[in-house]
Amino acid sequence: MSAIVLAQNSESINPGLAAIGYGLAAIGPGLGVAMIFAAVINGTARQPEARGVLLGLAWTTFAIVEVLALLGFVLFFMVG
């Protein structure tokens, strides 16, 4: 069965199952954000003068990772 057929038949998905799916999908961005800021803390501890550059990169990648979580949240309401 192709992805298009599954998307067209999305009305039959149980809303409780969709909530579990979103909860599991939120684990990925949560771990991603934790890894981003752990790397910034580690990098700042090793080279304190690079703190500004590291924080700038961290906030940029944080925004990208959070967009994935928000996309999952929107899809949860579209399916549910």
Image (cartoon, grey):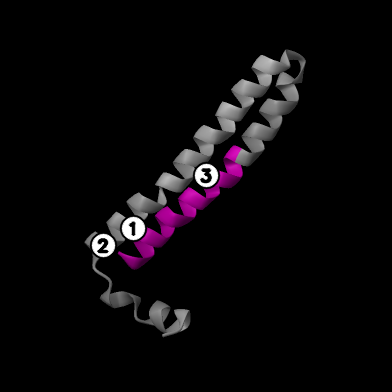
Task: Classify 2 as above or below 15.
Answer: below
At a point 54% along the width and 49% down the height, the residue shown is 67
Is 4 one of the magenta-colored residues?
no
The type of residue carrying mark 3 is Glu
Residue at screen point 38% across, 65% down: 78
Q: Which residue is mark 1?
A: 21
Q: Nearer the viewer, residue 23 or 42?
A: 42
- Point out residue 55 in the picture as x, y percentages from the top left corner: 67, 26
Question: Disc 1 vs disc 2: Cβ atoms closer than 8 Å?
Answer: yes
Looking at the image, residue 12 lies above or below residue 33: below
Q: What is the span of residues highlighted in magenta in the rendered image?
A: 62-80
Q: Secondary structure at mark 3?
A: helix
Which of the two labelled residues, at mark 3 and mark 1, occupies the earlier sequence position? 1
Amino acid carrying mark 2 in the image: Leu
Q: Position of residue 61 (x, y in %)?
A: 63, 40
Q: CA distance from mark 3 to mark 1?
A: 17 Å
Looking at the image, is mark 3 or mark 2 nearer the viewer? 2
Q: Mark 2 or mark 3, which is nearer the start of the sequence?
A: 2
Q: Nearer the viewer, residue 80 or 31?
A: 31
Label 2 element class? helix
Question: Which residue bears the numbered disc 3?
Answer: 66
- Residue at 73%, 17% in the rendered image: 47
79 magenta-colored: yes
Q: CA distance from mark 3 to mark 2?
A: 22 Å
Residue 8 coordinates in the image, percent (x, y): 39, 81
Lateral position of residue 52 relative to residue 13, left or right: right
Gap in angstroms between the C-alphas marked 1 and 2: 6 Å
